[in-house]
Image (spheres, helix red, strand yellow):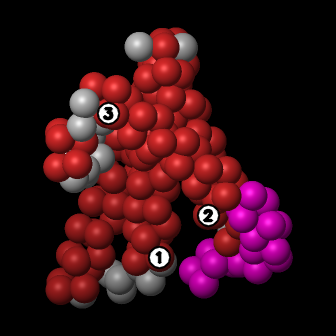
Amino acid sequence: MSRYSQLTKSVTEGVAVFLFALILVLQASNILFRYTGIYPPLTWVEEFSRFSFIWILFLLWHIADRQGEHFVVDVVREKLSPRGRKRLDVMAHGLALAFAAAVLWASAQFIPTTMLYSTNSFEWLPMGVVYLVIPLGFVMVAVERLRLLLQTLLS
């Protein structure tokens, strides 16, 4: 599992850093173009930035799960006994797995139809390609939550 964890972390962080750097360069260029008149602003940059942020979010979600970095309210958890905390953790991981399964099922229903139309700025790019990150991200979230569930049960 550690090889999987290292690989997914390296690849997803690499893609996220690349996309974020590209967003910064493109947005800075567009600002320069807009206020200097050197070149007309690129109309597709806004849509590309929006899609890139969606990809960054879904690609990095599983890493936040892995490292326990999601925002949590742990008032109830702190008041529970160790056995109660374990039960709460099992329930939380189970609910997260159920949510991931529901999203994966919905994605399988939704994405094929979005392959039929293109994005506004990129006529060659089907919207479904943009949405493919949702099942990809949720598969990684499901794997992480399953790993966390097994770790909790075995501890």
Q: Is residue 155 left or right of residue 25?
A: right
Q: In what element is the residue under mark 2?
A: helix
Location of residue 103 in the rendering, given as x and y in whole percent from the top left corner: 64, 59
| Magenta-highlighted residues | 105-124
In the picture, the disc for residue 85 is 3
The amino acid sitting under disc 3 is Arg
Circle 2 is placed at which residue position?
Answer: 130
Distance from disc 3 to disc 2, alpha carbons, whole Å, reads 38 Å
In the picture, the disc for residue 15 is none
Q: Is residue 136 left or right of residue 27?
A: right
Q: Is residue 88 left or right of residue 124?
A: left
* The quarter of the displayed image where residue 34 is located: bottom left
Location of residue 142 in the rendering, given as x and y in whole percent from the top left corner: 58, 39
In depth, the one of 24 and 75 nearer the eye is: 75
Q: Of marks 3 and 1, which one's residue comes earlier in the chain?
A: 1
Give the number of the mark in front: 1 or 2: 2
Query: For the N terminus, which image quadrant?
Result: top right
Q: In what element is the residue under mark 3?
A: helix
Residue 40 seen in the current view:
yes
